[in-house]
Amino acid sequence: MSALDRDGAGHGNIVPSAAGAQTGGEPIPPLEWEARVELAIAYRLLDWLGLTDLIHTHISAQVPGRPEQYLLLPYGHLFGEARASQMVKVDPDGGILSDPSGLGISRGGFCIHSALHMARPDAVCVMHAHSEATIAVANYRRGLLPISQHALRFYGRIAYLDYCGGFDTAEKRARLPQALGAGHTLMLRNHGPLIVGRSVREAFSLIYYLERACRMQVASLSQCSDADRELVFVEEAECAAMAQAFQGGESVIDREWNALVRMLQQTSPGFDS
Ligand SMILES: [Zn+2]
């Protein structure tokens, strides 16, 4: 019996304690501490999945009740090292509000997150990755194909944006929310996906299923030279129905999340410190 089995009594809900937690001498409000823990968990889960790129790419989360304040990992920490107390707090321009490690953030990286946070009031979390499978699908002219059940939750909700180098001007940054529209997934071609979540755990769930769907597509396309002739596509009516059925699902996301937190408590403790 594994340690996880022995401890698997179902106590997955995180009840983080903010007692004594401080940044810059100021106590951290309980809701902010909870958001910090959730964010640290998400970083460690992307590490667990191998959706990392050294110290690059980011997950940003809004501070509860402070819509123009965001938390993210210090620029120089690996995702697997993420700790709630070490998160850097910034304003929409990437200006530092608190930074216990002193490492700051990648302003060039954060600006793509900020553009979506500011344009979409529901963007509590913005997640970005550079995985091989997602970039391969972003680079494919037809994008994500409806050839797996995993892909159907993105049907009609995924957008694409052509490569334009760094997002170093306001005009380029404005392209991000414009391209995303009302969807939740923006594939930056030749670069990687951006996911908008109404919560950190929702964004994690989306990036997990996106990664799986992209891996399935890469594997499927590797078998054929003529996708239209050789692959079986899901009928359009089924695609729309399943895409709708996948909306919401918060209780399933909570179940998945709580199970993963129990795993991390065993395999990667310290995220809540
Ligand atoms: Zn990137």
Image (cartoon, rainbow, N blue to C red):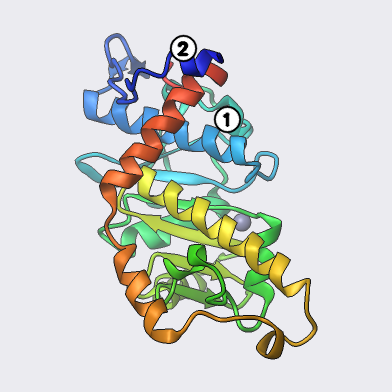
Query: In the drawing, what numbered circle is on residue 42?
Result: none
Query: In the drawing, what numbered circle is on residue 6?
Result: 2
Residue 145 is situated, as x and y percent measured from the top left of the image, at 57, 77
Q: Going 49% across and 25% down the picture, which residue do you hit? A: 263
Q: Nearer the viewer, residue 148 or 181?
A: 148
What residue sits right under mark 1 in the picture? 103
Crowd rating for badge 2 (residues with CA inside 10 Å; few <14, some 14–19, many 20+): few
Disc 2 is placed on an element classified as helix
Residue 149 is situated, as x and y percent measured from the top left of the image, at 49, 66
In the rendered structure, the answer to whether residue 223 lies left or right of residue 42 reads right
* Residue situated furthest top in the rendering: 20
In the depicted structure, whether residue 89 falls above or below residue 30: below
Image quadrant of ligand 1 equals bottom right
Q: Going 51% across and 73% down the picture, which residue do you hit? A: 172
The quadrant of the picture occupied by the N terminus is top right
- Give the residue type at disc 2: Arg
- Give the residue type at disc 1: Leu
In the figure, residue 192 lies in which quadrant?
bottom right
In the rendered structure, the answer to whether residue 242 lies left or right of residue 27 reads right
Q: Does the residue labelled 2 lie within 8 Å of ligand 1?
A: no
